[in-house]
Image (spheres, rainbow, N blue to C red):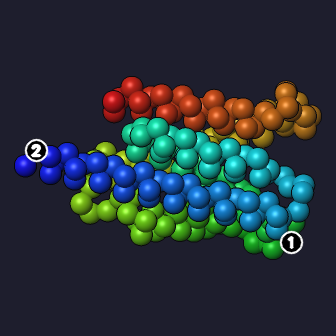
């Protein structure tokens, strides 16, 4: 009986690790495909998007709490939405900038959540929730808010400095600093 329980736990762990590697592989293939297709210079860089994807992969592979993983998923969603928004701007796809950015962010969020749901990362059987919400979704919303706030903060710093940054990769450094603080806060609360 005990051997069967141990064997079942080992099989579940192997299955979970296999699913994690499949998801990481999917992200890596998607990212490499985008690098090949997109032009070399963009206002919101592919490096930012790649860094958020790596953050998701690292936290998931280390087995950290889903709320911490969600922080980086939210950052990836915002980074991807900003990236697509800049592509639309370059192609003169007009409209209200706030509505365009909002709809791109919502569409990216919905597609990400659906892909996680169908990959089995969360669902109705999951009992790990914060305020009745899946931990990864709660963390994603938190990470998205932090990412938007740091992006606009970095833009405000540029405006006050006559369009110049204080240091190279300013937006990325401020964003990752804030995301790490957000993740540490969740780690301290939910460990």
The one nearer the camera, 131 or 12, is 12
Q: Which residue is mark 1?
A: 91
Residue behind mark 2: 2
Q: Nearer the viewer, residue 157 or 28?
A: 28
Residue 16 in percent (x, y) is at: 38, 53
Whether residue 156 is visible to the viewer of this picture, yes or no, is no
Q: What kind of element bears circle 2?
A: helix
Crowd tier of the residue under label 1, counting other residues whose Cα lies within 10 Å: few below 14, some 14–19, many 20 or above:
few
For the point 75% across and 72% down, the residue is 95
**Extreme-left residue of the structure:** 1
Identified at 84% across, 37% down, the residue is 159
Side of 35 where 101 appears, left or right: left
* Dot 2 alpha-carbon crowd within 10 angstroms: few under 14, some 14 to 19, many 20 or more: few
Q: Determine the residue positioned at 22% across, 53% down.
A: 8
Of mark 1 and mark 2, the one earlier in the sequence is 2
> SS for tag 1?
loop
Q: Quadrant of residue 42?
A: bottom right
Quadrant in which the C terminus is drawn: top left
> Residue 54, located in which quarter of the rendered image?
top right
């Amino acid at each position: 009986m005990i051997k069967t329980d141990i064997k079942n736990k080992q099989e579940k762990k192997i299955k979970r690790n296999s699913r994690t590697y499949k998801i990481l592989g999917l992200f890596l293939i998607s990212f490499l495909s985008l690098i090949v297709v997109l032009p070399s210079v963009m206002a919101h860089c592919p490096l930012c998007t790649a860094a958020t994807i790596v953050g998701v992969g690292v936290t998931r592979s280390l087995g950290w709490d889903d709320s911490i993983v969600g922080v980086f998923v939210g950052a990836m969603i915002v980074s991807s939405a900003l990236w697509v928004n800049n592509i639309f701007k370059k192609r003169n796809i007009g409209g209200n900038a706030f509505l365009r950015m909002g709809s791109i962010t919502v569409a990216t969020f919905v597609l990400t959540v659906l892909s996680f749901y169908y990959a089995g990362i969360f669902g109705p059987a999951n009992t790990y929730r914060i305020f009745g919400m899946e931990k990864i979704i709660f963390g994603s919303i938190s990470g998205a808010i932090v990412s938007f706030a740091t992006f606009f903060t970095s833009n405000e710093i540029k405006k006050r400095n006559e369009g110049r940054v204080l240091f190279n990769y300013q937006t990325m450094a401020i964003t990752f600093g804030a995301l790490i603080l957000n993740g540490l806060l969740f780690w301290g609360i939910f460990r």
